[in-house]
Amino acid sequence: MDGFAQWLATTSASATIQKTLWLIPVMQTIHIICVALVFSSVAMIEFRILGVSKAQTMAQTAHRFVPWIFSGVVVLALTGAVLIVGEPARSLPSFEFQAKMAFLAVALALTFAFTSSVRRHAEIWEENSGARLMTSALALVALAAWCAVVVYGRWIAYTVVH
Amino acid sequence: MHWFMGFLSWLGETPLSRWIAESFWAFPALEVVHVFAISMVFGTVVIIDLRLLGLASTSRRYTAMAHELLPWTWGAFVLAAASGSLLFSSRPVGYFEDKDFGLKFVLMGLAGVNMLVFHFVTSKHVTDWDRGPTPWAAKLAGALSILLWIGVVYLARMTGFTIVQGGA
């Protein structure tokens, strides 16, 4: 990974991003805005799970917010890729970056599983059942994983470069 | 103004400020809290603004959504202000003299004015459009709100570049 990061840093794409002064802050701004949209969408679904918000059915809540999670993640990946090409040594070899990607994989897998569960068994959310308790627990684990993505994401900036 | 700069210099030398500035983890940890808080502020504001624009959640009553979400917006705003104040205290004079940082508060002020106009003028007749299409004034408030808050996030990010060489 160190070798790849060093090679990426020598490419003309990396040099262009470095030289275009507005590019990195603009990419970071779009990245932060998408973090906000994804995190809030996750929060809205958690509120429905925990019963903080009961106005809508789980199927309605998922229909409203899940697309924002996945399309937000796509934009996050694209802006994140530009940031990585611009400063590969800051992200790729860092423990924080790798931990962030691992938690992202967990969060995405759980969100996929949750979404398909709601699609197939929407009725369990409108009654009290064991299946509901199990899925709620998984959703809370997903929330914890999303939080870890945010924490490690911010901590990439404080990676100790060896 | 002289007394105020004196206050900022004093604030930067308090033990808490020095600890935030010098600790390995205090500043990043406060940034993480700030990121979570602004995520909830921005996200909940956009959910309400998209409803005002008629672009999402159109099947829901506006007042029911606002009643459900605004306590989270304000709670997160208080958390963002508290963590932001602590971040500010680590380098008060530097932040105060930073143009992007100042402009960020101008845009937040404008977002506040937009919100007050909506609250005291536009939403007076909310019962007329609570379930149906929103009037142009409500759409304008929603659009202004989204644009102003995007500007706030951009200027906040720029502050990190303009206040410290190299950024963090």
Image: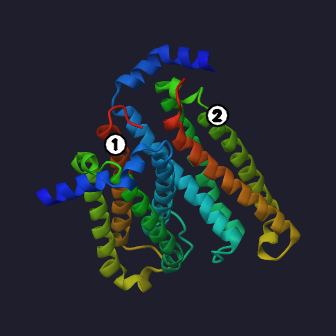
Chain where mark 2 sits = A
Numbered mark located on residue A98 in the image:
2
Residue that protrudes farthest toward the right in the picture: A130
Is A21 in front, or is B145?
A21
Could you give the CA–CA distance between mark 2 and mark 1, rounded to whole angstroms?
26 Å
Residue marked by disc 1:
B158
Relative horizontal placement of residue B11, taking residue B86 as reference (left or right): left
Foreground residue, A95 or A50?
A: A95
* Nearer to the camera, A30 or A10: A10
Given the image, on which type of amino acid does mark 1 rest? Met
What residue is drawn where x is 38% and y is 65%?
B142
Q: Residue furthest left?
A: B2
Disc 1: which chain?
A: B
Considering the image in quadrants, where does the C terminus of chain B appear?
Answer: top left
Residue B110 image label: none
Residue at (77% x, 58% y) in the render: A138
Left or right? Give the position of A110 relative to A79. Answer: right
At label 2, the amino acid type is Gln
Indicate the quadrant where residue B166 lies.
Answer: top left
Q: Which residue: 55% across, 68% down?
A: B57
Q: Is residue A118 above or below residue A17?
A: below
- Is the residue marked by circle 1 packed among few (<14), some (14-19), or many (20+) residues within 10 Å? many
What residue do we see at 53% from left, 54% from top? A37
In-front residue for pair B6/A156: B6
Vertical comparison of A11 with B82: above or below: above
Q: Is residue A39 above or below residue A95?
A: below
Q: Secondary structure at mark 2?
A: helix
**Mark 2 closeness class: few <14, some 14–19, many ≥20 residues within 10 Å:** some
Query: In the rendered view of the protein, which quadrant contains the N terminus of chain B?
Result: bottom left
In percent of width and height, residue A60 lies at 67, 68
